[in-house]
Image: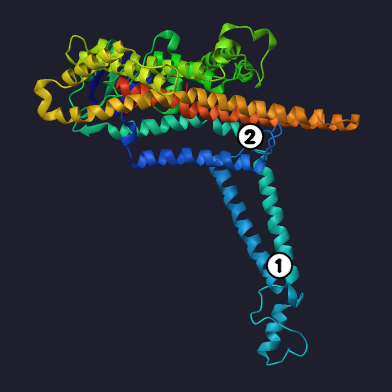
Amino acid sequence: MIVKMKHLDLVCVASERDSALERLRSLGAVHLDLGSAQGAAVAAAKDDAADAETAVRIILKARGRKPAPAQGETAFTASVPEILAFQDKADALKRDAERLQREIVKYEPYGDFDPALARKLLDLGIDLSSVAELPEKLPEKRLSEMRADLARAESERAAIEADLARIDEKEIVAEYPELGDRIAFAAAKELMSEQGAIAFISGWVPVPQVAHLRLYAHDAAWGILLRDPAEGETPPTLVEPPKAFRPMKVLFDGLGIAPAYTEADVSVPFMCYFSLFFAMLVGDGAYGAIFLAATLAMRKKLPRSWFILLTVFSSATVLWGILSNTWFGAGLPFLAGLPTVKWLADPSYHNMMLLCFTIGVSHLMLARIWNGICRLPDSTAVAEFGWAGVLLFMYLVTNSIVGIFSGIPTWAFWVFGASLVCVFGFSVKPSELKTRGAELGMLPLNIMSALGDIISYVRLFAVGLASVKVAENFNSMATGLVAGADAFWLKALMSLAMVAILVVGHGLNLAMAGLSILVHAVRHNTLEFSNHKGVSWAGYAFSPFKKNTP
């Protein structure tokens, strides 16, 4: 569900402004619009955070791919300003070295002459052209001195780089949360306005936290005003799915999406269908086993929610591999007799397309029926149920178009006619015809687009089949090498080549599978399903003002 919010206006004594913000931060239940603060203090805090990130990048670049120095091996301890100063000096030395290199190349043809002596002789009017060829503009130093300066600049720069590489960046990285807290506090302080002897700030608080806030306000002698969101206000969205589906919050955060405050929490169908899409798009049980093994191996490093999600998605892929008997593009003999394997192995691919269209229509009809139930007893619920009937008819049309069904049954036309009456008759109330009447003109296009929405689910079959075919081709390519070898040494060489082809080929296929998940599995949930459910993903996530460091 989406947690209800209350708008908060908080008033305190101006002299206690900082302590009030500290207590509000320790409460960790109020969302403030920190992003709107752009004052000097916020900019300074952001600059400090940016400098810390730059310092870490400097250390990592100097170190290259070498590991962090072991305990006791750090050459010296350096602060962020010191590291930046070292880098500035190294950059200046690099510029000097480049300038010297250009000078050396320019004057090298003239040899290692003394420009000061040449300048004196020329000033005395002595013609040196018969003795040596000189450049039109004399250098400041001898060529040997330039080379010595170049060597010194490169040596000093190398020494700085070596020192930077010996610094352990973990100390600076550990300060990141504190720097984030400083930015947030500076932003909150800017948002807290003063008027005379009082200071005040506004934000949003979840309804379940209101009682706790009242106790805090009583103890701190704050004045608070709580009210429901007014028309036109956009509260932040706090999604609280059922416990089993709570890990979906990290996926939403990872994708950077949130439903609007007035929309629905679609975590449950999102996770169920996403798991199915994940399995079908990857299309190979062995790949799922690799994902699962990697997830289990990283159990201690992964956040709990990500571990649960990846375990569910990988397990679903392994299950799909069993049902379709697809393992590295090949089949296992002892699974060949399963009814699902025989059904999915239909050479015309009709069964697989039927499955995709059935998944699609169930996904979209769920959205419409859900809308209808939520809108009861309002008359617009009838239109939503009518849309479910339209989708069912378009499902039958789709299967007829591709030859899965021989035709559309007569009863389906009666359902379609009744559904059209419901959609056109109840989508807009009579009192809304002046303001929303134009929407009725778009309904024919929306009805036709429903056909395209169902057809789009065939991508689950197409992408999954492409993954299997790519795996099969790499397998054929690899085994063909060994089959064509006669001599032992040639077989051994071809065997190594076969292993390389299999590793590279299936590795690329795995990468393509990951990309298809991001594109297609996310799309079906956030576009087709969400359009029918009425979820625009135009919200912004609830982010309470709280301290990230102990």
Where in the figure is residue 239, as x and y percent of width and height? 36, 17
Numbered label tally: 2
Where in the figure is residue 412, as x and y percent of width and height? 30, 13
Where in the figure is residue 148, as x and y percent of width and height? 74, 64
Residue 546 seen = no
Q: What's the residue at 62%, 14% (across, down)?
A: 325
116 relative position to 447: left or right = right
Quarter-of-image position of residue 95: bottom right
Quarter-of-image position of residue 529: top left
Q: Does dot 1 land on a helix, a strand or a loop?
A: helix
- Spatial CA distance of label 1 from label 2 is 36 Å
Image quarter where the N terminus lies is top left
Q: Nearer the viewer, residue 354 or 457?
A: 354
Say above or below: 382 vs 516: above
Q: Does dot 2 land on a helix, a strand or a loop?
A: loop
Where in the figure is residue 186, as x and y percent of width and height? 36, 34
State the residue position of label 2: 168
Say above or below: 107 vs 37: below
Q: What's the residue at 61%, 40% (across, down)?
A: 59
Q: What's the residue at 65%, 43% (across, down)?
A: 62
Q: Nearer the viewer, residue 216 or 409?
A: 409
Amino acid type for the residue under numbered disc 1: Met
Q: Residues within 10 Å of mark 1 (few under 14, many from 20)?
A: many
357 relative position to 137: left or right = left
- Say which mark, if any, is on residue 146: 1
